[in-house]
């Protein structure tokens, strides 16, 4: 039994020249190999991921990717660690105050999986050209203004690199995928109960065009309210050049109402689907919401790299008040 038996189950030979994964790695990733096979694990082992933003959501994505066994994770986030630690960013516990979030988290992330190389890039994301993103197999961005998300998405598209982004606000959160022209395999059960692999092709669109669709002109009138809230929160950050300040809650809610009215009108939404009560629940990062959205997005990155399983096409929307998630396909 042991590793030799594990290799036989995974469909592997014992010829070390044919495989780059070591026996120790086979033992470490045993359950994953049994779940999605050796070839998929090998793709993960060869993949390099860029994560921009290490807030609570970014921490969840990094945690799941590190445990999955990717080759390397490059992290960009020089945001100083605040005096009041964020309970949702579990990597920074015990670090020095005002140290950059990425550097402050490196040791704790590395401890999760010593086989994964953790790289901290101290440059600001706006200084990076398209050639920088060409060195990665996937890019995930969070805690960024919408203008930066759109810019990074465009640069990734130029180099044919899959782009993912997301964020959370209190009880709510979202994830977005731009996998360009994505082909993957889906397991199909025949009438004779035999498993066969079916190749599927999907076309995606960038974030900018996807958010430019208006209700009645490509956007369903019954669009999920979290999608509308996402637009409100992105516009708030762009218009005010900052995130919400929980210490000035009442004034911030009034500003949010103004941004909401402008956003819904711009989208062609005739009714108020983003209530005042909803705006009162968007402050701070909640660990359970970060865990759900971060788990989904990390899983989507893994599916994108391994090309196994149906990917989300193209928005994931989470409502923490009802503990439900939904997907929306907005393709232009």
Image (cartoon, helix red, strand yellow):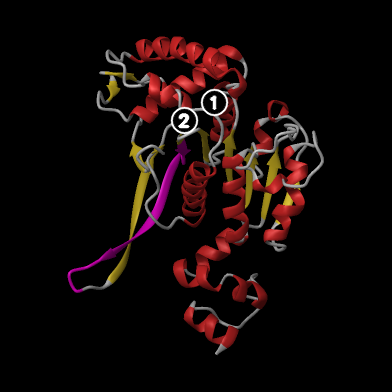
Picture residue at 55% right of the left edge, 19% below the top: 249
Alpha carbon distance from label 2 to label 1: 8 Å
User: Which secondary structure class fits the magenta region best?
Assistant: strand
Q: Is residue 173 visible?
A: yes
191 within the magenta span: yes
Look at the picture and state if 285 lies above or below 210. Answer: below
Which label is found at residue 150?
Answer: 1
Q: Nearer the viewer, residue 331 or 148?
A: 148
Give how far across and how far down residue 74 sits, in percent: 69, 45
Q: Are marks 2 and 1 in contact (CB under 8 Å)?
A: yes
Q: Which residues, given as a range, are shown in magenta? A: 174-192
Looking at the rendered image, the quarter that the N terminus falls into is bottom right
Are there few (<14), some (14-19), or many (20+) residues within 10 Å of tag 2?
many
213 within the magenta span: no
Look at the picture and state if 35 lies above or below 164. Answer: below
Picture residue at 55% right of the left edge, 31% below the top: 153
Which label is found at residue 206?
Answer: 2
């Amino acid at each position: 039994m042991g590793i030799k038996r594990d290799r036989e189950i995974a469909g592997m030979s014992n010829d070390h020249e044919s495989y780059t994964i070591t026996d120790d790695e086979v033992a470490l990733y045993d359950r994953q190999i049994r779940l999605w096979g050796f070839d998929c694990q090998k793709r993960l082992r060869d993949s390099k991921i860029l994560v921009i933003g290490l807030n609570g959501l970014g921490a969840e994505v990094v945690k799941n990717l590190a445990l999955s066994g990717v080759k390397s994770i490059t992290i960009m986030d020089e945001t100083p660690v605040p005096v009041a630690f964020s309970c949702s960013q579990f990597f920074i516990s015990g670090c020095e105050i005002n140290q950059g979030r990425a550097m402050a988290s490196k040791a704790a992330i590395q401890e999760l999986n010593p086989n994964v190389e953790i790289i901290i890039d101290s440059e600001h994301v706006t200084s990076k050209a398209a050639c920088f993103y060409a060195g990665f197999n996937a890019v995930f961005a969070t805690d960024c203004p919408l203008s930066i998300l759109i810019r990074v998405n465009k640069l990734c598209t130029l180099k044919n690199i899959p782009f993912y982004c997301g964020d959370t606000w209190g009880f709510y959160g979202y994830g977005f995928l731009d996998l360009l022209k994505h082909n993957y395999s889906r397991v199909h059960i025949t009438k004779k109960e035999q498993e066969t692999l079916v190749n599927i092709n999907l076309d995606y669109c960038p974030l900018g065009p996807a958010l430019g669709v208006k209700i009645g002109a490509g956007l369903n009138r019954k669009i999920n309210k979290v999608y509308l809230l996402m637009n409100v929160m992105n516009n708030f950050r762009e218009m005010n050049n900052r995130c919400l300040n929980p210490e000035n809650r009442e004034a911030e809610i009034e500003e949010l109402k103004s941004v909401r009215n402008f956003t819904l009108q711009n989208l062609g939404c005739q009714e108020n689907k983003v209530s005042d009560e909803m705006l009162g629940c968007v402050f701070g990062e909640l660990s359970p919401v970060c865990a759900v959205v971060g788990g989904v997005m990390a899983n989507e990155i893994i599916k994108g790299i391994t090309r196994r399983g149906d990917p989300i096409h193209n928005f994931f929307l989470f409502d923490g008040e009802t503990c439900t998630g939904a997907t929306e396909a907005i393709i232009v």
